[in-house]
Amino acid sequence: MKLVAIDTSGPVIGVALWCDGDVRVRTERVARGAEARLVPWIQELCAEMGVALPALDGLAVGVGPGAFTGVRVGMATAAGLAMSLDRPLWGCDSLSPRGARVGPRSLVLLDARKGRVYAAAFDGTMTHPPADVTADVAVRWLAAPFLATGEGALVYADIVRAAGGTLADDADDPAVDALARLGAAALGRGQGKPPNEVVPTYIRGFS
Amino acid sequence: MRVLGIETSCDETAASVVAEEGVLSDVVHTQTVHAEWGGVVPELAARAHLEKLGPTVQAALAEAGIARPEAVAATAGPGLIGAVLVGLSFAKALAAGWDVPFIGVNHLEAHMLAPLLETPAPTFPFLALVVSGGHTALYRCEGLGRYEVLGQTVDDAAGEAYDKVARMLGLGWPGGPVVDALAASGDPTAVRLPRPLPNQGHGAYDLSFSGLKTAVRQALAREPRPSDADVCASFQAAAVDCLIDRLERAAKDTGIRRVAVTGGVAANSELRARLAAGRLEAFIPPRKRCTDNAAMVANVGRRYLLAGRRDAFDLAARPSWSPA
């Protein structure tokens, strides 16, 4: 199984190339300009791992919640590749791979601005699906001690610690390696879709 | 060379294939979601682009009868940044997957050169008036990539003035078509409105629509209130007078009598009629190529590609990008 995974829902964006269990990633903290990074990174990774784009079996992409524009840049890139390569696309919420990266029991927080976070909790399975809440609410979803990750865990580190949580190492990591691993399994189960059928999860309306 | 063009800079999601023999397909999905907000909402526009772009591109390829193009061109700016990013990101990924050249296109240059898709087409040099809801500028076009800004609006774009007048009259959004339609039954001399002149602290070919908009508001406050049709006709006459005046001045001063008029406001019936009856040699694309479309993007992209230019995949969006 060979696939490209993309997540641009947070301030650190990432791309992974999964090649039969081996994975390589590119990540960078960007204020803007994700659109200038993604395709060059994918081409670099393909060159490094000796994979031609047409050899991909599919793609995986984080569909949010997260920064609206960021989510769209990643999804448009993934959809464009899926369409031109005629390969399936698997859309995954942007919080699950971040949780999977640090272990089965975790709280994932992405900074949603306005004093809020996009949060999800995992304890073996997803116990609280992605929601737009305050960090104070989210930290009550898991009994202490728990591991917290995601950019929002850094932003609201005091609240996480006060609730008995511990910050994961590299908490702002976009977890594209985990997304690639989840994506390989999902595509293997035939869960990839035509790109037009993969839709973003904004959760929040516009304003 | 068959080039796929993609346009997502405002509220039209568009894809088109242009080739040596002409426009093979020209698909435009106009977003209707903005009407209830009285104007384009950038976040809603970007959301709608992501939803519609895939099917729009597939329709354009199918209509052109091809599975893949030989190159991809996409608007890289100027425009609403969130909207531009959807089309630009998608386009680069398509080109990478198909392993074909990619080029980013300036939206205003695409409008300027849109008349080159038609027959007869203007030959260089020509003047180009790009007039829409977001832009109003007059260019001197000497050749591909060789442009000079002669003048531009110092405040509102012409189309923006139409939208604001329509809002004052409670006519909904977008204002251009409805003001144009109502004007047909009104008296263009019923309401006295100013024709702001150039050279009042600005460039000789600059335009201003802010004072005209204010004059309309004042006219509506008078008793007896003029009819909506008379207001529309009088406003339209004044706005078109200003546009024609700058074009004629520029043509006289430069000695260039070929003028291209493009952008959404170029779909206006009064402007088209006045240009058709005027002394200038006017090139106005059909209405669907005046408003935002992707054939104009593919057209410009194809011309640059044939001239040997292509962009790298690290091309970033340019929300403010002057073509000159």
Image (cartoon, rainbow, N blue to C red):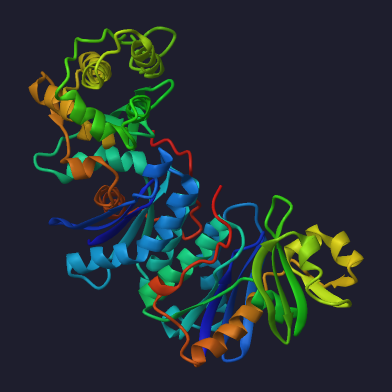
Residue drawn at the location 31% of the way across and 52% of the way down: B301
Compared across the picture, whether B75 is left or right of A175 comes to left
In depth, the one of B297 and B241 nearer the eye is: B241
Q: Position of residue B125 (x, y in %)?
A: 22, 30
Q: Residue at x 51, y 58 (%)?
A: B314
Where does residue B67 sit, x and y in percent of width and height?
A: 25, 73
Q: Residue furthest front?
A: B224
Closest to the observer, A15 or B252: A15
Residue A195 spot, x, y in % from top left: 41, 73
Question: From what the image shows, is residue A192 above or below residue B205?
Answer: below
Q: Is residue B225 visible?
A: yes
Residue B262 appears in the picture as rendered? no
For residue A152, which quarter of the picture? bottom right
In the picture, measured across the screen, residue A99 lies left or right of residue A61, that is right
x then y, percent, for residue B181: 19, 30
Picture layout, residue B167 above or below residue B28: above
